[in-house]
Image (spheres, grey):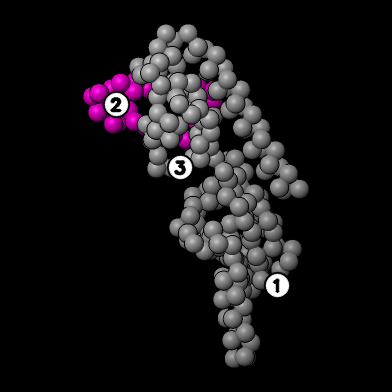
Amino acid sequence: MKSSTWMFSILLVLLCVLQPASAEEDPTYRIKAGDLLDVYVHENPDLSLQVAVLPDGTISYPLVGNLYVQGLTTSGLQDILKTKFLDYLQTPVVVVSINSQASYKVYVMGEVSQPGALEYQEDLRLTDYIALAGGMTNNADLEECYIYSVAEDSTHRIVNLKEIFEENKQEMNITLKPDDTIVLDRKSGFFVGTWIEVAQILSILVSSATMYIIITRER
């Protein structure tokens, strides 16, 4: 009995050591939509699966059904699954790891030096992304910076950058959401309609591509 317990302990240690680097390096990482998870249930191959986190932050899992996992750590999800499996397994052993993290972008378009896609980072604000895009050109209209958000049903908001830079109104220097698009118009305002249309089309393409990736991963 002692020997089997000892071997079982070694197995658990090996499972932790063999997890992908992303999960081990950052145990505080919070699961988000688009992530791909590896779930291992000891001696239960039918329950050991790879699952994608859907856009609404849920996963669908055997014996559990739909489960909201966005914002959980891998260890937090492990504890929840163990509790769920207690109705079916005597001593469930569950290991959850991140197979791949969702890659989100922020798009900066219009009157910046280097328009294009930037990696989304939770702690960056509007002016940070503009700086990463090489800063504004001399033709940029500081009073009307458009932000288009996929998460807000095709709406856009306008931020006055002049008030941020000249009056230090940092409350207007907002954080962005994944796949947001920043549009800096020319001072004349002539091109803003075109840029907003492009931003909307880009947003639809990003959403469609994300859904396609999630669906194909689950097949």
Check the image and name the residue furthest to the right.
219
Instruction: State yes or no: residue 57 in magenta.
Output: no
**Residue 65 on image: x %, y %:** 65, 52
Q: Earlier in the sequence, mark 3 or mark 1?
A: 1
Horizontal and vertical percent position of residue 36: 62, 51
The range drawn in magenta is 152-180
C-alpha span from label 1 to label 2 = 58 Å
Residue 55 versus residue 89: which sits nearer the camera? Answer: 55
Decide if residue 218 is on the left or right side of residue 140: right
- Tag 1 and tag 2, C-beta contact below 8 Å: no
Find residue 92 and report its horizontal and vertical position in percent. Answer: 62, 70
Residue for badge 2: 164
At x 54% / y 40%, what residue is drawn?
Answer: 104
Q: Is residue 19 above or below residue 9?
A: above
**Residue drawn where x is 76% and y is 48% of the image:** 219
Residue type for callout 3: Gln
SS for tag 3? loop
The quarter of the picture where the N terminus appears is bottom right
Residue occupied by mark 3: 121
Viewer-proximal residue among 31 and 180: 180
**SS at badge 2:** helix
Badge 2: residue crowd in 10 Å (few <14, some 14–19, many ≥20) = some
Separation of residues labelled 3 and 1 (CA atoms): 38 Å
Q: Amino acid at mark 1?
A: Glu
What's the amino acid at mark 2? Ile
Q: Residue at label 1?
A: 43
Query: Mark number for residue 118?
Result: none
- CA–CA distance in space, label 3 to label 2: 20 Å
